[in-house]
Image (cartoon, rainbow, N blue to C red):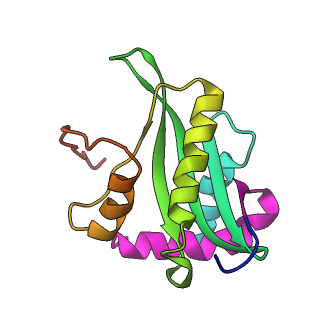
């Protein structure tokens, strides 16, 4: 570990540090047009407390080095609330130090606190680095096939 680490909800005053990470995450997934102001408006809805979800941040020595965005969701199969971890990102220099795992653990704790049935997430099939982390958590790979319908 580099220094003192803290994981917790992202506050409104953290948005300026968060926005470049959101842009990097979007570039990784080949988003063509990254709009920081649109990102600010969208992600601000997840500032704690929120009825829509939660932004978790990871800080080392008071510098934001990673984030996870959680969406409150539902499953009609259980039926119960679920938590979708839609984004998980750690800056390149901080990778390999357990920050991603810490964010996943914090996401699971937030889900438990809400009484959710499970935390779920997805990644691209070729993102083997992320899959190594996800496989180490005890999470089970889903057999579901996802579809997107552009509108």
Viewer-side residue, 22 vs 64: 64
On the rendered structure, is 16 left or right of 79?
Answer: right
Q: Name the residue: 65% across, 69% down.
A: 18
In this view, which residue lies farthest toward the bottom?
93
Q: Quadrant of residue 26?
A: bottom left
Viewer-side residue, 73 vs 111: 111
Q: Is residue 19 found inside the magenta-colored segment of the image?
A: yes
Query: How far across and down, in percent of the image, does residue 40 sit?
Result: 65, 62
Q: Name the residue: 65% across, 30% down.
A: 113
> Is residue 3 at all visible to an observer of this figure?
yes
Q: Quadrant of the N terminus?
A: bottom right
Specify start and end residues of the magenta stretch as a single range.
6-35
On the rendered structure, is 117 left or right of 28?
Answer: right
Viewer-side residue, 49 vs 3: 3
Q: Quadrant of residue 128?
A: bottom left
Q: Name the residue: 26% across, 61% down.
A: 124
Q: Quadrant of residue 108?
A: top right
> Is residue 35 at all visible to an observer of this figure?
no
Query: How far across and down, in percent of the image, does residue 39 sit?
Result: 58, 63
In this view, which residue lies farthest toward the top?
79
Query: How far across and down, in percent of the image, does residue 114 sit?
Result: 63, 27
Q: Is residue 77 found inside the magenta-colored segment of the image?
A: no
Above-or-below relation of 26 to 124: below
Tally of numbered discs: 0
Q: Name the residue: 37% across, 45% down.
A: 138
Query: How far across and down, in percent of the image, does residue 112 sit?
Result: 59, 31
On the rendered structure, is 95 left or right of 6?
Answer: left
């Amino acid at each position: 570990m580099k220094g003192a680490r803290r994981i917790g909800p992202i506050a409104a005053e953290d948005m300026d540090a968060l926005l470049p990470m959101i842009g990097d995450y979007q570039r990784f997934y080949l988003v063509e047009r990254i709009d920081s102001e649109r990102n600010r408006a969208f992600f601000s809805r997840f500032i704690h407390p929120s009825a829509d979800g939660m932004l978790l941040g990871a800080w080392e020595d008071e510098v934001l080095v990673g984030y996870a965005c959680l969406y409150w969701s539902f499953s009609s199969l259980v039926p119960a609330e679920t938590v979708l971890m839609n984004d998980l990102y750690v800056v390149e220099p901080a990778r390999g130090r357990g920050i991603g795992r810490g964010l996943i653990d914090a996401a699971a704790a937030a889900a438990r606190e809400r009484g959710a049935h499970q935390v779920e997430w997805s990644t691209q099939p070729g993102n083997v680095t992320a899959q190594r982390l996800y496989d180490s958590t005890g999470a089970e790979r889903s057999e579901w096939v996802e579809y997107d319908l552009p509108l």
